[in-house]
Image (cartoon, rainbow, N blue to C red):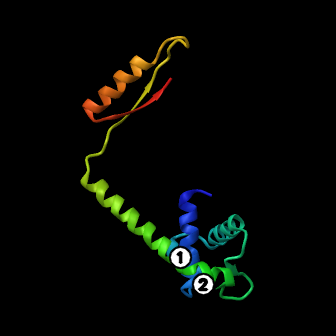
Amino acid sequence: MKLYDRKLSWKIFCLIGQGRTLSHAAQECGIDLPYASRLISKLEDELGFFLVLHRPRPMRLSENGIKIFPFVEEFAAAQDRLENECREIGVNLQKIPKRNIRISLPINLNKEPLLEKLVNYERRQQCYFRIFC
C-alpha cells in the first residue's frame, strides 16, 4: 500500500472511531465509499486483525481497534503536523533545481574522478544531480 493510501486508511479509521459512519468518513476525505472500504480492508489485511466490526451499521471499532485508537489518533495528528511544517518550510525556501545527467562511459573507465568533480560542482553551485551511468 502506498504511503498516501496508508495515511488515508488511518484517517478513515480515526473518523470511524470518532463516531462517524464510513460514508461520512469517505466524504470528509474526498473519496468514494467503495474506495474507503477497500482501504480499511487492505489495512486490516496488512495488520492481520480486524480494526472495525463490519456487520453492525454504522461500523464500530473492534476490540483491537479500540486498543490502538489512541495511538492512531496521535499518529495521524503527528503526520498532519509534519506535513504542515514541511509545507511551511518549502514555502520559505528557494526551490532546488533538479538536473539529470545521463553519461555513457566505457565499463573499464575509472569513474571516481569524474564523480568527484560532479560532487564538488554540486557543492559549489548548490544544486543536485541525479546521475545515471
Q: Quadrant of residue 100?
A: top left
Asked whether disc 2 touches disc 1, contact meaning CB atoms under 8 Å apart, the reply is no
Q: Is residue 123 left or right of residue 70?
A: left
**What residue lies at 65% left-to-right and 88% top-to-bottom?**
58
Q: Is residue 86 above or below residue 11?
A: above
Three-letter code for the amino acid on which mark 2 is drawn: Thr
Q: Secondary structure at mark 2?
A: loop
Q: Is residue 98 above or below residue 44?
A: above
Q: Quadrant of residue 64?
A: bottom right
The residue carrying mark 1 is 71
Image coordinates for residue 6, horizontal then vertical, percent: 58, 64
Residue ranking furthest to the right:
55
- Numbered circles on residues, count: 2
> How far apart are the two marked residues, 2 and 1, measured between alpha carbons?
20 Å
In the image shown, does 39 or 23 lie closer to the viewer?
A: 39
**Residue 92 shows in this picture:** yes
**What residue lies at 37% left-to-right and 23% top-to-bottom?**
116
Q: Is residue 72 above or below residue 93?
A: below
The residue carrying mark 2 is 21
Q: Is residue 99 left or right of residue 56?
A: left
Image coordinates for residue 91, horizontal then vertical, percent: 28, 55
Classed neighbour count for the residue bearing mark 1: other residues with Cα under 10 Å, few (<14), some (14–19), many (≥20): few
Q: Quadrant of residue 50?
A: bottom right
Image coordinates for residue 118, horizontal then vertical, percent: 36, 24
